[in-house]
Image (cartoon, rainbow, N blue to C red):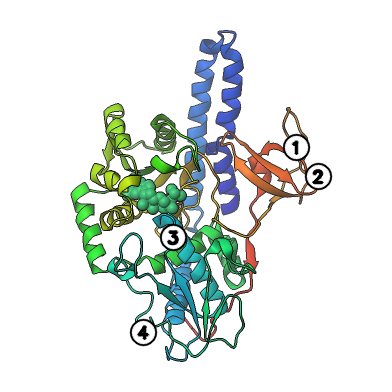
Amino acid sequence: LKKQNSVLRNIIVGYFINGELNKIKKSLDKYNTYNDLSATFNLVNEYKKSLITNIDKIYQIDGYTKWREKEANDLSSLVQQRFRSLQNPINCNTAKKLICNINKGCGFGCQIHHLVYCFLVAYGTERTLILKSKGWRYQKEGWESVFLPLSDTCLSPNGKTHANWPSDESKQVIILPIVDNIYPKPIYQPPSVPADLAQRLSKMHGYPLVWWVGQVLKYLMRPNNNTKELLDNKRQKIKFSNPIVGVHIRRTDKVGTEAAFHDIEEYMIRVHQYFESLEKTPKIKRIFLASDDPKVITAAKQRYVEYEIIADIDIAQTASVSRRYSNLSLQGIIIDIYFLSRCDYLVCTFSSQVCRVAYELMQTHFPDAYNRFSSLDDIYYYGGQNPHPQIVTINHVPKREGEIELKINDEIEVYGNHWDGYSKGRNLRTGMIGLFPSFKIKNPVKAVVFPKYQHLRI
Ligand code: GDP
């Protein structure tokens, strides 16, 4: 029932109706008949809102709300306990270890994702993760200047025998290269989720992989006392309160190299749609806006006076590419990710690792927040992930130019979602590349056997 609800919600909110209506509108505009039909458009939008409200109500009254909350808490406690046990071996001198260096030559989000991959390999091989972070490009004192150490008892990289990945069981310490260069690829990296949790996760969450990555981030990104104080003070200063929409606008070095430019208006349309989809639009429409370009903040505040926009222009200034790798910029990105992840909804570009980290962390604040985003470009992915085709659930006969045929159980390598109801991809059976309705495929959970940490009882 829950799955059906979210699929339904996705079809309605998820751009299909809007996309199809816009196509009709465009062709009608040519003949100036749009005005005659605008009443119909408005009615369809009202109908859409009412359907969404009803679907959300089913969630509230289906009797599973309490169960979902409890299951999410239980699963989180279970994996956090496993992480603590892995990271605090009884004897650090004899413990099997995996060494990971944070200093990948990229930004904070990318480095954190690199660290998540290291942690997943550590969890999969039952080795305590030892993080090397002295000389970190953001903060030369290292990880512990902002976050808690990954272990209370075991931080030393020493051991009797050392070897590079993959090596074998006999070596006490194994050194992991950066994710881009690893060979053979570990089966534990995304999109794998532990088989012993997969079934429970699939019942509870719309996207188990994102939940799983979120749990690793929850462990890794535990703030130290200074960071806690920084975040608490900030929360009070900006009067952060829900409901609120998080908007992340990535500019500077990303635009034109790894992502296309998107005007603020494109983000604001999605914000507007989110507020409109709520049963009661709040009186104060609040936005938490983060960017690496201070001009974005000035422009947004000038152009969108009907919104209460919380944004820190100083943080955006230190985030801009010329001032990025500094202590201040590190504080700024930690603050921005923290508050983005605590919003009710995220509007951003998933091509940015900043937003993907916020989205992953968001899963730790709701039983299931997989639907609480709108990306202007990519679908969610994990950089360097193992191949992960999606599966066709409904046949499709091409109806327009550029569409491809789908047959139930075909595997599709998805290139991207056009966010108008259609996605582009390659059918691995036919080799054909083209468009198809996004709701006709599903993202299967890749359950892989990880250690079960059975000595831990909860
Ligand atoms: P990506 O390049 O957007 O995929 O993400 P990365 O995290 O790898 O690199 C971008 C870096 O730019 C971040 O880590 C920050 O240092 C900075 N940055 C980008 N957007 C923001 C933002 O909204 N706020 C702050 N404070 N910094 C940002």
* Cα distance between the residues tagged 2 and 3: 38 Å
Earlier in the chain: of badge 2 and badge 3, it is: 3
* Cα distance between the residues tagged 3 and 4: 24 Å
* Cα distance between the residues tagged 4 and 2: 54 Å
- Residue depicted at 29% across the width and 68% down the height: 141
Q: Are marks 1 and 2 in contact (CB under 8 Å)?
A: yes
Earlier in the chain: of badge 1 and badge 2, it is: 1
Vertical side of 48 occupied by 334: above or below: below
- Mark 1 surroundings within 10 Å by alpha-carbon count, few (fewer than 14), some (14 through 19), many (20 or more): many
- Can residue 228 be seen at all in this image of the molecule? yes
Helix or strand or loop: what does disc 3 sit on? helix
- Residue depicted at 39% across the width and 32% down the height: 264
Mark 3 sits on what residue?
111
In percent of width and height, residue 97 lies at 49, 82
Mark 2 sits on what residue?
430
Q: Quadrant of residue 26?
A: top right
In percent of width and height, residue 140 lies at 30, 65
Helix or strand or loop: what does disc 4 sit on? loop
Q: Nearer the viewer, residue 279 or 79?
A: 79
Earlier in the chain: of badge 1 and badge 3, it is: 3
* Cα distance between the residues tagged 1 and 2: 9 Å
Is 161 on the left or on the right of 330, as rendered?
right
Mark 4 sits on what residue?
153
- Mark 2 surroundings within 10 Å by alpha-carbon count, few (fewer than 14), some (14 through 19), many (20 or more): few
Under mark 3, the amino acid is: Gln
